[in-house]
Each structure stands twice: as structure tokens, then as C-alpha cells.
Image: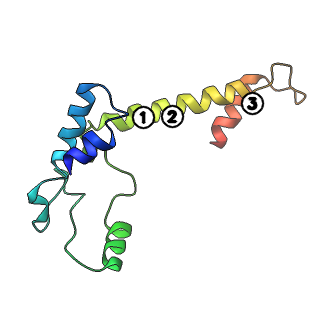
């Protein structure tokens, strides 16, 4: 399974040997015989627990009610600050897109570009 996911599936896209090594390392916690034990956790905090064997509805309930609404970076082997970096990058992208859409001429409302941008930021 590790070979199929890390090498065959991503082999054509992930060409750097260090990236492939990273994928293999992350997959070690997912593809292990320990996963068959009851209450095997994928994170230290225990937020991601492999549920007991059950019916389809049991799994759906588990996913909806027990798993976090947003994926924790720990489950992907990343530092908790990765969320903050991602949010900063996303905000910068949104704001730069808004700036690029602003008209280059004087506004008919009499507002400056900065005032228009401030209103957009407040709306967001």
C-alpha cells in the first residue's frame, strides 16, 4: 500500500527524492499493522481515532460528530504554525486580488481606493 500511494500514484508528479521520502514517512502512521488495534490514534492529542468496526451509518456519524471541523496540521506531520502561515498567505492572496480589481480611475462615490478596500475587508 505504501508503495502504491507514495511511488506509483504520486511517482509521476513528485519527482524530488526528498518529497517522496516525506510522503513515505507520513504514510508510516497510516499504513501500519497497529491501525487494526482498537482506538489507534493518528495524532498525539487523540483527535483522530480509528473507529471500531461498524456499519456505514456508524462511520458517517463518527465523521460528522467526532472529527474536528478543520483538519489539524499534526495529522499531516506539520507544525501547528502551518495553519497560521496558510491563513496569512490566503489573506494576502484575497487582498491582492481585491486590489487588482479596483478601478484605476477616481471613484464616482468620492471614496479613495483605501476606503473602498477597508469596506471590502470589513465585509470579508
Task: Write the residue at 21% across / 42% down.
Answer: 26
Category of crowding for the residue at label 1, using alpha-carbon neighbours closer than 10 angstroms: few (below 14), some (14–19), many (at least 20): few
In this picture, is 122 found above or below 93? below
Which image quarter is the C terminus in?
A: top right
Task: Write the residue at 70% across / 35% down.
Answer: 119
Category of crowding for the residue at label 2, using alpha-carbon neighbours closer than 10 angstroms: few (below 14), some (14–19), many (at least 20): few
Mark 2 or mark 3: name the one nearer the start of the chain.
2
Quickly name the residue at label 2.
Answer: 90
Quickly name the residue at label 1.
Answer: 86
Instruction: Please state if 100 lies on the left or on the right of 27 as rendered.
Output: right
Percent of width and height locating residue 48: 24, 58
Percent of width and height locating residue 79: 26, 36
Mark-to-mark CA distance, 1 and 3: 25 Å
In this picture, is 58 found above or below 112? below
Q: Are marks 1 and 2 in contact (CB under 8 Å)?
A: yes
Category of crowding for the residue at label 3, using alpha-carbon neighbours closer than 10 angstroms: few (below 14), some (14–19), many (at least 20): some
In this picture, is 76 found above or below 19? below
Judge by depth and name the residue closer to the eye, 95 or 122.
95
In this picture, is 62 found above or below 71? below
Mark in front: 1 vs 3: 1
Which SS class for mark 2? helix
Which SS class for mark 3? helix
Judge by depth and name the residue closer to the eye, 66 or 60.
60
Instruction: Please state if 113 lies on the left or on the right of 49 as rendered.
Output: right
Mark-to-mark CA distance, 2 and 3: 20 Å
Mark in front: 2 vs 3: 2
Quickly name the residue at label 3.
Answer: 116
Total marks in image: 3
Amino acid at each position: 500500500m505504501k508503495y502504491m500511494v507514495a511511488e506509483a500514484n504520486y511517482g509521476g508528479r513528485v519527482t524530488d527524492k526528498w518529497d517522496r521520502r516525506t510522503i513515505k514517512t507520513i504514510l508510516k502512521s497510516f499504513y501500519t499493522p497497529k491501525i487494526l488495534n482498537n482506538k489507534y490514534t493518528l495524532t498525539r492529542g487523540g483527535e483522530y481515532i480509528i473507529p471500531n468496526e461498524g456499519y456505514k451509518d456508524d462511520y458517517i456519524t463518527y465523521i460528522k460528530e467526532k472529527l474536528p471541523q478543520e483538519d489539524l496540521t499534526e495529522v499531516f506531520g506539520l507544525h501547528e504554525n502551518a495553519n497560521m502561515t496558510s491563513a496569512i498567505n490566503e489573506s494576502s492572496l484575497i487582498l491582492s486580488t481585491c486590489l487588482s480589481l479596483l478601478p484605476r480611475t477616481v471613484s464616482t462615490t468620492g471614496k479613495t481606493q483605501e476606503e473602498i478596500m477597508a469596506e471590502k475587508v470589513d465585509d470579508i
